[in-house]
Image (spheres, rainbow, N blue to C red):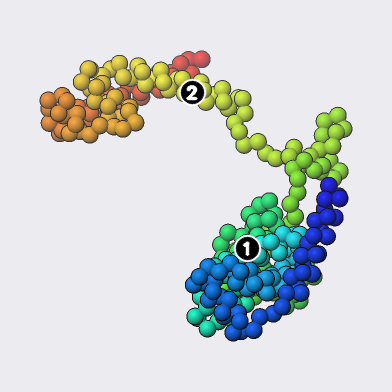
Amino acid sequence: MATSAVSSQGSDRRFIRTAMKAPLLEADHELNLARAWHEHQDEDALHELTSAYMRLVIAMAAKFRVYGLPMGDLVQEGNVGLMQAAQRFDPERGVRFSTYASWWIRSSIQDYILRNWSIVRTGTTAAQKSLFFNLRRLRALINDGGRASMTPEGRDFIADKLRVPLRDVEAMESRLSASDRSLNATVPGAEGGEGASMEWQDMLADDRPDPEDQTREAHDAEVRRRWLARALETLNERELFIIKRRRLSEDGQTLEALGEQLGISKERVRQVEHQALNKLRAALLKETDDMESMLEDD
């Protein structure tokens, strides 16, 4: 693994040295290359155009090394942005390709950093992305970078400067101040059973119901099922037919559809349903009253 890492670093350095030796392009020649690719899909012109601005990718990637990701990976992502720029560049707009490509390169590198800086997604909105890449710089600007936490005035300044909600500033400050931690890492100074080291995952709360709650819920569900079954026995055949199709099925039938099946009007179906519901309510209330009487007798 170590030999592979050294080899990879050597390849990255050779690539960077080669890229930095590529000749710069004059404006007229750059325009001709861009036209050749844009109009005729000339791959030789594309290669010369992108090779000349590989140094721009490397310079941009170097600015983002502070986020701790491998330089080679940053350069690769920048190359993706460079190719996207070449694909979308319109040579007739009167803009230098380097100016246009800079935006695509920076955006590609920043998106990569946001995806890989942490195992938890850091920025999902434009405001969060702006905060992630500007919070440290603005803290240094107001001499607030040496503090463990920002002052209320500092947070207000940054929120106003970046035009983002104050709560987003507070959330990003908290996110950047903490590093990823494995749940299998041991908790300093904490021991579990038989003197074993306690891991962070041992301190996670289990939000699942405990066996006692599960038993109680299963018992209550069975009681309710029996109550409903006995209540349904108080209905006549037509009332039971309507209640089952209106209330006890996933796709309840309409009053009109049931009226057609029973040969009565939908208003009459509504009346029968109302009558059946009253019967059920009375039967269920009797069940609960009987239960309370049994508890009082005990």
- Of residues 133 and 251, the one nearer the viewer is 133
Horizontal relation, residue 68 to residue 212: left or right: right
- Which image quarter: residue 42? bottom right
Dot 1, how many residues are within 10 Å of its Cα: few (below 14), some (14-19), or many (20+)?
some
The answer to whether residue 91 is seen in the rendering is yes
Look at discs 2 and 1 and give the one toward the viewer: 1
Q: Earlier in the sequence, mark 2 or mark 1?
A: 1
The answer to whether residue 148 is seen in the rendering is no
Q: What x and y, as percent, mark residue 61?
A: 72, 68
Q: Which residue is mark 2?
A: 220
State whether residue 13 is above or below residue 270: below
Q: What x and y, as percent, mark residue 47?
A: 63, 68
Horizontal relation, residue 179 to residue 222: left or right: right
Q: Residue at x 19, y 31 (%)?
A: 257
How many numbered marks have been drawn onto this rendered protein structure? 2
Residue type indicated by callout 2: Asp
Q: What x and y, as percent, mark residue 19?
A: 74, 70
In the rendered structure, find residue 234 and report the number of the disc placed on it: none
Q: CA distance from mark 2 to mark 1?
A: 60 Å
- Of residues 279 and 123, the one nearer the viewer is 123
Residue type indicated by callout 1: Val
State whether residue 121 is above or below residue 102: above
Q: Which residue is mark 1?
A: 80
- Which image quarter: residue 37? bottom right
Q: Residue at x 33, y 19 (%)?
A: 231
Horizontal relation, residue 86 to residue 224: left or right: right
| Label 1 element class | helix
State whether residue 80 is above or below residue 36: above
Q: Residue at x 60, y 33 (%)?
A: 208
Q: What x and y, as percent, mark residue 242?
A: 24, 25
- Of residues 41 and 137, the one nearer the viewer is 41
- Of residues 230 and 214, the one nearer the viewer is 214
